[in-house]
Amino acid sequence: MPLKVIVVGAGIGGLCAATSLRQAGHDVEIFERSSFTGEVGAALVLTPNGSRVLSSLGFSFERARACKMVQWDTILGDSMGRVASLDLSMAEQRFGAPLWSVHRVDLHNELLRLATSEDTPGSKPVTLRLGAQVVDASTDGSITLKDGSRHAADLIVGADGLHSVLRGTVLTHDTKVSASGLSAFRFLMDTTMLEDDAKLAQVVEARSPGLSLIIDAKETISERHVVWYPCRDGEVQNFVGIHPTRPADHEETETEAMKDSMLKEFGHFNPGIVRIISQSSHVKCWPLYVHEPLPTWYNGRVILIGDAAHPMMPFGGQGSNSAMEDAGALGHLFRSVHDPATIEKRLQLFWLVRKDRVSRTQTMAKVRAGREKEVEQELKKYADPPGSAVPSTHQERTDHDYDYDVFAKCEEVLLEGQMGEIKLE
């Protein structure tokens, strides 16, 4: 008999987990508090460790209009001179999967198709319940909705994001959260707006196809940079700007006020970058917070994944990719699992697969590429195996993040469990 699984949250992590568990042969139901299924936001980068999981689910990068990233350049913000370049053209050969950039809406829609389609033989489509706000959960495998109704399952997956309700079921108290002193703005711009503007020719030509990290090299105290890459088959450009937090940095701030704030913060950058910001629309901005790794992600039959388990700073772009790893691990570890009595042992295995890996990734996410030495000592606490080397350079960080195969790690832990090398409670 398949397990009955409830997933709380229909974001990227929730849909990935639901699809992975569905394809593992289980009966999955998603409870989503909103009344719509469309993800909002800008774009993100799918690194090989995440896209490997998506490929295993049958994700169509073509349908999602994803752009292949072949290069990562570090560029000076004032002169637009290139100071470093990471060749990603051979990523598929090197890491087993390429890098992609994708708009969140397109990613979400393709994941929704995979979760709910009826054309997967031997797999029951995921049931999606909208407008279903979960207000509580129990470790015995049940959730309570705002309307007072209670729903039970063999396994509860908390994919309910940064402000997770289910985190309160798993932990008696949350871990330390501190303001980073940094904020991030985001906006999208049609590619034609850049190509048709003669004044932007120089700044457009300075970029090679792929991802550009445009830095303020003269500032040695505060972090300030712009990340720029395409999405939607190259028809749209995505911009993210990291900067010291300003009083106006809040998503609810009107666009023009936000734009003025961004122009003050990046006004010393190349005139082309300044012009792009000045022509932007629908700018959103929010302060960034540092979350320390949680002591555990599960309690009884409730497991947290994604931002509910490991909220991250944006450096390295591993937030969504780590949620995909979580989803892949859940599906892999729960294949051929039909006895509810074995669920908690499987969750212990899941924790062993994920805890050190994600804690390293979460720690590195506090610093941008090239500053890995700043967190090296902290990373050593999560070395796997203990005492082994941890990333200390941009290249080592890239290898650490991209080369990881969550399915291989699952097999390793499963084998150790069968051999009695892992002592389960």
Image (cartoon, helix red, strand yellow):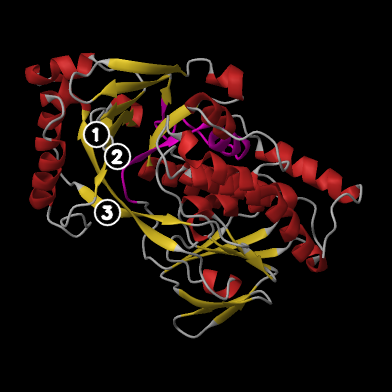
Mark drawn on residue 271: none
Q: CA distance from mark 1 to mark 3?
A: 21 Å
Q: The C terminus is located in which quarter?
A: bottom right
Mark drawn on residue 223: 2
| Residue displayed at 10% across by 30% down | 275
Q: Which residue is the site of mark 3?
A: 286
| Residue kind at label 1, given as amino acid type | Glu
Residue 189 appears in the figure: yes
Q: Which residue is the site of mark 1?
A: 219
What is the crowding at mark 3: few (fewer than 14 residues within 10 Å), some, or many (at least 20)? some
Q: In the displayed structure, does residue 314 sit left or right of residue 8?
A: left
Labels 1 and 3 touching (C-beta < 8 A) = no
Element carrying mark 1: loop
Q: CA distance from mark 2 to mark 1?
A: 7 Å
Kindly report which numbered mark, 3 or 2, lies closer to the viewer in this rendering. Answer: 2
Q: Is residue 409 above or below residue 62?
A: below
Residue range (magenta): 40-67
